[in-house]
Image (cartoon, rainbow, N blue to C red):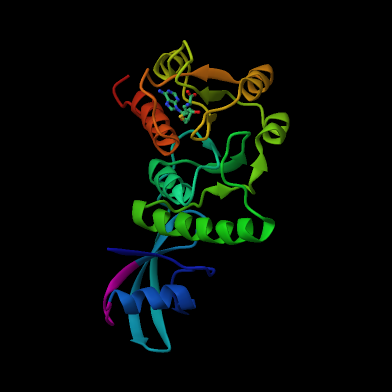
Amino acid sequence: MTRLYCNAPLAINTQLELPASAARHTMVLRLRPGDDITLFNGEGGEYSAKIVDIHKHGTTVDIISFQPRENELPYRVTLVQSMPEASKMDLVIEKAIELGVARICPVESERSVVRLTEERAEKRAIRWKSIIIASSEQSGRNRFAELDDITPFKKWVESHESQPTLMLSPHAKDSLADWAFHNQPQDVTLIIGPEGGFSREEEGLAVRYGAITVSLGTRILRTETAGMAAVSALTAIWNRTDP
Ligand code: SAH
């Protein structure tokens, strides 16, 4: 079943001219009148719709029913990702959405190689938002994750919300798994360093502000792997149905 993000108010028993980007998708996918599709607008739940008309200038659908389907993790995971090289952040965002992350905070840490001008940062943010949409379409999420502006790491530390904050480090003595076993599922923040890791000063600052350093084992993971591995580990430990 095709799932499309529809940037418009949706209501059952109405006919809707799809917004341009969703209409373009229906053309690309070669859908035809009579085809069923699923629409969501990022505010929760999803709508079943049927294509009534489709042509070069637009696509019209009948919205038939609403399913209040939620596909969020029962706790909010915030991923604080130090800006990695080149376009690796695209991958980090795509995978974070698939894995259920609710908020992504890109931070510039001391050893982040990439520094973006304001103009380039704005362009990146637009691209990242479109990745959030595409990945939510694909993975069945009906709510969009929040995406923060790129923030200097120290500033982020000094202003972050108070919830358990785990700083991932290959040198930490405690393991993420042990922490997750000993703590109930709850909103949590995961901090991932850049290719060169965090400086001692950054680590010290985060710990002074309440972060706990935890490890995923003794192998050094790439920065783009570490967040995915951490979220997957939490999910595996916290989402067991057999108590
Ligand atoms: N040279 C750096 C490694 C950086 S790896 C160092 O020795 O610290 C990039 C980031 O991925 C790290 O800052 C950390 O947040 C995360 N990471 C990589 N491997 C990890 C592991 N085994 N356990 C926990 N975090 C890890």
The quadrant holding residue 163 is top right
Q: Is residue 184 above or below residue 23?
A: above
Which residue appears at 40% of the width and 82% of the height?
A: 60
Point 58% across, 56% down: residue: 125
Q: Position of residue 85 (x, y in %)?
A: 49, 45
129 is higher (above) or lower (below) than 112: below
User: Is residue 67 shown to the viewer in this render?
Assistant: no
In the rendered view, tell whether residue 8 sits above or below residue 33: above
Residue sitting nearer the eye, 200 or 129 = 200
Residue in front for this viewpoint, 70 or 144: 144
Where's the C terminus, which quadrant?
top left
Seen at 69% across and 32% down, the residue is: 154
**Residue 10, position in %: x, y?**
49, 68
Q: Is residue 210 visible?
A: yes
**What secondary structure is the stretch in magenta mostly built from?**
loop
- Is residue 3 highlighted in magenta? no
Spot the residue most to the top. Answer: 173
Magenta span covers which residues?
30-37
The answer to whether residue 27 is left or right of residue 192 is left
Q: Is residue 33 magenta?
A: yes
Front residue of 58/48: it is 58
Residue 32: x, y in percent?
Answer: 27, 81
Q: Position of residue 157 (x, y in %)?
A: 68, 30
Counting the numbered discs, the total is: 0
Please identify the quadrant where the N terminus is shown: bottom left
